[in-house]
Amino acid sequence: MNILQINSSLRGNQSESTRVANAIVAKVAGANPGATVTVRDLGANPHPVLDEAALGALFTPADQRTAEQAARVALDDTLIAEAQAADVIVIGAPMYNFGMPIQLKAWFDAIARAGVTFRYTENGPEGLLKNKKVFVATARGGIYPLDADPQVPHIRMLLNFLGLTDHQFIYSAGLAMGPEAAAKGQADADAAVAALA
């Protein structure tokens, strides 16, 4: 089994989303002896954001790219290959200003490539990253009802678009609402991890 862990917090070892992502990876790896784990820390090593130069490189035929364009596309190719090779993807996704960190959005932008990880058909888009389990550890300062969560629907939509339809979200909530609420949020996340099959 290949496990891909994507951390996107800027808080390093102080990150709650990374702490929970680490716990999920430990649980999954422990249940699958011999599992390999690849960790990509987007907070420590951010992937370049999609800009005009990157877009130009992607839309230039491979045999016509400059060395600089080829190098830029190769950065995205590496992330795509990691996602394709993974059986399980674990994403640490803190909530920043009601959304995902730009570092995580840059990862989604890099791996979403027409004809490679999704395609358009006469019936609409079809995700090509199939048969993978995804866990998302999200940490947030407040508590948001499921029908009013500003972050999770966006992440879920991106996952589904890519064919990653088997996903589970684990929440550390209320982290900025005082010590008692924070402790409960962490305990709830720990209980959810412990309950993973």
Image (cartoon, rainbow, N blue to C red):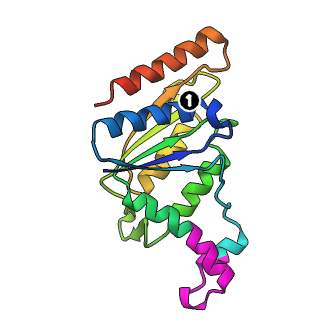
* Corner quadrant of residue 10: top right
The residue shown at (51%, 69%) is 77
Q: Is residue 59 above or below residue 97?
A: below
> Which residue reaches farthest top?
180
Viewed as shown, does residue 18 lie left or right of 56?
A: left
The residue shown at (48%, 35%) is 22
**Could you tell me which secondary element the residue under label 1 belongs to?**
helix
The residue where tag 1 is placed is: 148
* Corner quadrant of residue 14: top right
Q: Is residue 44 above or below residue 20?
A: below
Label total for image: 1
* Near-viewer residue (110 or 82): 82
Viewed as shown, does residue 2 lie left or right of 179?
A: left
> Which residue reaches farthest bottom?
64
> Which residue reaches farthest front?
34
Coordinates of residue 186 in the picture (x, y in percent): 52, 20
Coordinates of residue 48 in the picture (x, y in percent): 67, 61
* Near-viewer residue (82 or 116): 82
Q: Is residue 97 visible?
A: yes
The residue shown at (56%, 33%) is 17
| Kind of residue at disc 1 | Ala
Q: Quadrant of the C terminus?
A: top left
The local crowd at label 1, few if under 14, some if 14 to 19, many if 20 or more residues have their Cα within 10 Å, is few
Coordinates of residue 132 in the picture (x, y in percent): 33, 51
Boundaries of the magenta span:
56-75
**The stretch drawn in magenta includes residue 160:** no
The residue shown at (37%, 70%) is 121
Q: Is residue 24 above or below residue 51?
A: above
Q: Is residue 129 above or below residue 154?
A: below
Coordinates of residue 64 in the picture (x, y in percent): 60, 91
**The stretch drawn in magenta includes residue 71:** yes
